[in-house]
Image (cartoon, rainbow, N blue to C red):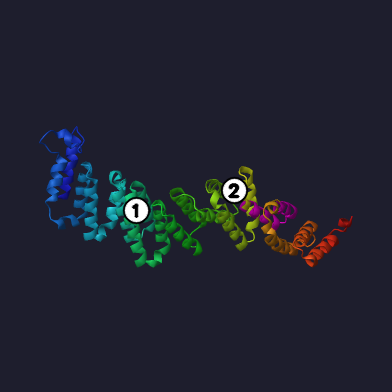
Amino acid sequence: GVKHIRYYLEDEDEESDEPPFAIEATGPGKVSINERVLKRLLLLPHAAFLNPDLTFIFCDTALKLEQNKRAIEALERLFEGNPDACGQIIGWIEANETASLTAPAQKFLVRLGLETGELQKAGNAARAAAELDSTQIPSLIEMIDERLKSTPEHETELTLMLTELYSRAGNSEYAEELLTSLKDKEAVEDEEIMRLTNDIMEHCGATINGVVSAVDLCFKGGRVQESFPHVIAFYRDNEDLHADLASEIKQLAEENDSYWELVAELLDAVSKEETLSAAFRYLQARAHLWNGEVERAIFEFDQLLMFNKSLRGELTTLYSEAVERYPQNTTLALALYQLYLEEKQHTKAAEYLCLALRSDPGQLK
């Protein structure tokens, strides 16, 4: 039966001058061969469609009649009644571009990929389904989340899928939360983290967490210039968040001393494009101080101090820490002398004046 039906349809296709899916071309009151076959197949009992070959004929015919949804529903019923046909079903969808380029088909491929453990295929299908029809995203998230609860051994792969789907849904909070968990567990390569970071910023807009994540990854690989576009774009669009972003970048450097040199390089590049706000100028000066550009840093801090005298306490602490690394730097000792003198702490002021004179006796002149 199955073989004869297919021969019948193929013979009709070869002899007809009209495309088999153009029902309108058959004239009023007439139906095409494909329509007649589909109607006859629909009369068969449900159990008959547990036969993959019969289901595929049904689906081929439905596609010719542009009934894509009906074809996918038939495949879903086949899978539910005959799970062993999973591989054949995947093969049929992938071989039929008309079907595979629809959101329902890609969503079904997600389900099949999850069932067979082909998680990379499932992830690709989830991405395709979301791109084809964003209304599918909530049900895709629900499907993958359920699988995550039942198969924790695949946590990394499934979390990657969820991160991307939440990103495409515009939910930056959940997407960044999942991305942070992947980073903390060091579960995936930095390149994949960067791809997801860019994906979140593309679909949700730039956030502080996203920019800082990108900066961290770029710094980790020593790729300062790759962090520049993220920082400059956020800097230009979010004037009210400059202090928050500067604080987060400072925290990165405080957790990894090797980052201070990269922070200086990054902010020097930003300063060539934009006038730095006070928060970024302070961070830039601090990076220069840490990197040994003491004279430059003190000059930059002095500029800030002219407009914000409350910085004295912070600068006293910073300079005191720096003088332990650069005990022979006269400029640094004199800066501490001046700060303590202004605070009327004469004993400490005298201590650093003496240090300056010991490091550079020429100051006596």
Residue at the extreme front: 344
Q: Which region is colored magenta?
A: 279-302
Q: Nearer the viewer, residue 146 or 94?
A: 146
Classed neighbour count for the residue bearing mark 2: other residues with Cα under 10 Å, few (<14), some (14–19), many (≥20): some
Q: Nearer the viewer, residue 163 or 313?
A: 313
Tell me what residue is drawn at x 81 percent, y 66 percent: 351
Check disc 2 and give the amino acid type. Answer: Gln
Tell me what residue is drawn at x 33 percent, y 57 percent: 113
Is 300 in the magenta?
yes
User: What mark, if any, has residue 72 been given in the picture?
Assistant: none
> In terms of secondary structure, what is the magenta stretch mainly?
helix
Check disc 1 and give the amino acid type. Answer: Ile
Residue 19: x %, y % from top left: 21, 35
Q: Nearer the viewer, residue 115 or 314?
A: 314
Is 327 in the magenta?
no
Q: Can you tell which quarter of the image residue 287 is in?
A: bottom right
| The C terminus - image quarter | bottom right
Q: Nearer the viewer, residue 326 or 77?
A: 326
Residue 329: x %, y % from top left: 79, 58
Q: Can you tell which quarter of the image residue 174 is in?
A: bottom left
User: What mark, if any, has residue 225 been given in the picture?
Assistant: 2
Residue 24: x %, y % from top left: 17, 35
